[in-house]
Structures are given as structure tokens and as C-alpha cells.
Image: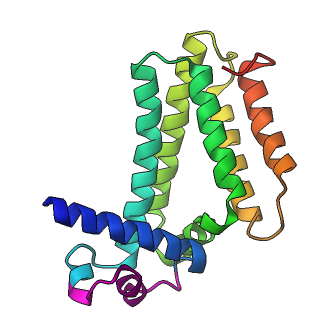
């Protein structure tokens, strides 16, 4: 794919992300995406065959970016605590940004489509966190926690907040409490690096 095609796919994903965050998965149509991107139907269908395909590529891109961030930090031998703090700060920004949440869209997607893709995304998230926790424990920056249990707590606390913020207001203090609990369970009362 040429440079223009890559740019067009980026434009589609960027605008579709905002539509999915605003309307959910089920309400977004290819026509909506054409309109917001300023593309003809043929222009859009040249790159994607369905909203499902676009949505999956958006989620895959987010997952890849997060995994690459951890692998890059480990490759540069950065402090595990520094990587953790950067990820937790990103999580906090996401948890407090209700307008750009894909949580409802993810739930709707899961109700309308086979869950194989979401199972794969969940496995990828577990691998990402396992890699970081193993690295931090090996370097003695993290406590020797049960990695599988800790990964489950991190993933499902995060997703739980994302879903509940669609139902009730979640305040900053609640988000801070959850993320600080994760941090303390991993590193104790160490200063943030």
C-alpha cells in the first residue's frame, strides 16, 4: 500500500474511533464514516469492507502500540517502575476521558460479533502485562507477586471502571485509588521513578 493509502486508512481509523466512542459500535454505519471522512463509498470500501473490520483494526492498533511501548522500554533496559508509572498515567488519562471511551462500543461489538477477536485481544493484554511484571520481578523492582492474579486484577479493574463510567459518574479519587493500589501491590511504598 502506498503512502496515500496509509494516510487514508489513518484518517478513516481516526474519525471512526471518534464515531465509535460517541455512538457505540452498532449505531455506526459505513455511510457515517464516509461522511465524517469526506470519502465516497468506493473510497472507503477500497480500504475496508465493514465497520467491524475498521473497529477491529483500531483495537489491534491500540494493542500493538501498548505492547510495543513495553517491549521498547525493556529493550532499552528502562526501569520497570518507570514503565509501570507511564502506563498507569496513561490508564488514568483514559479512565477520566469519558468522551473518547470505546467501552460501550466494545461491549456492543461483543454482542454482535463472534468473541474470538476479543478473546485474542484479552490474551494480548495479558501477555503485555505478564512481560512487564516478569521484567520488574527479575530486576527486583517489583515484589514477587503471583503474576497471573495481578494481571487479572489490573485488566479487569481497568475494564470495570471503563464500563461503570458509562453508567455512573466515576470521580478522580476512585481512579487514583485503584491505580495506586496496583502500584503499591507491585512496588510497595517506593518513590515513583
Q: Quadrant of residue 99?
A: bottom right
Residue 178 point in image, percent of width and height:
79, 42
Query: Would residue 155 be seen by someone viewing this image from the given angle?
Result: no
Residue found 47% across the figure and 31% down from its top: 70
Of all residues, the one furthest to the left in this rendering is: 2
Residue found 78% across the figure and 26% down from its top: 184
User: What is the quadrant of the N terminus in the image?
Assistant: bottom left
Residue 88 point in image, percent of width and height:
65, 38
- The range drawn in magenta is 26-42
Report the side of 68 relative to 21 (left or right). Answer: left
Q: Nearer the viewer, residue 69 or 145?
A: 69
Q: Verify whether residue 97 appears in magenta.
A: no
User: What is the quadrant of the C terminus in the image?
Assistant: top right
Report the side of 70 relative to 47 (left or right). Answer: right
Q: Is residue 159 above or below residue 125?
A: below
Report the side of 116 relative to 129 (left or right). Answer: left
Residue 96 point in image, percent of width and height:
72, 56
Residue found 61% across the figure and 64% down from its top: 101
Residue found 80% across the figure and 34% down from its top: 181
Q: Nearer the viewer, residue 116 or 53?
A: 53
Q: Verify whether residue 40 appears in magenta.
A: yes
Amino acid at each position: 500500500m502506498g503512502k496515500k493509502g496509509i494516510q487514508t486508512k489513518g484518517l478513516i481509523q481516526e474519525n471512526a474511533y471518534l464515531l465509535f466512542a460517541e455512538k457505540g459500535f452498532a449505531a455506526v454505519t459505513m455511510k457515517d464514516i464516509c461522511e465524517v471522512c469526506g470519502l465516497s463509498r468506493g473510497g472507503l470500501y477500497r480500504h475496508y469492507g465493514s465497520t467491524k473490520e475498521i473497529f477491529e483494526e483500531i483495537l489491534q492498533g491500540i494493542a500493538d502500540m501498548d505492547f510495543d511501548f513495553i517491549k521498547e522500554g525493556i529493550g532499552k533496559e528502562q526501569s520497570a517502575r518507570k514503565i509501570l508509572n507511564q502506563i498507569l498515567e496513561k490508564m488514568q488519562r483514559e479512565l477520566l476521558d469519558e468522551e473518547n471511551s470505546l467501552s460501550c462500543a466494545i461491549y456492543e461489538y461483543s454482542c454482535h460479533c463472534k468473541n474470538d477477536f476479543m478473546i485474542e485481544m484479552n490474551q494480548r493484554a495479558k501477555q503485555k502485562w505478564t512481560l512487564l511484571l516478569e521484567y520488574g520481578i527479575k530486576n527486583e523492582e517489583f515484589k514477587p507477586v503471583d503474576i497471573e492474579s495481578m494481571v487479572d486484577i489490573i485488566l479487569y479493574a481497568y475494564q470495570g471502571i471503563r464500563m461503570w463510567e458509562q453508567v455512573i459518574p466515576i470521580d478522580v479519587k476512585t481512579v487514583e485509588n485503584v491505580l495506586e493500589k496496583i502500584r503499591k501491590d507491585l512496588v510497595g511504598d517506593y518513590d515513583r521513578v
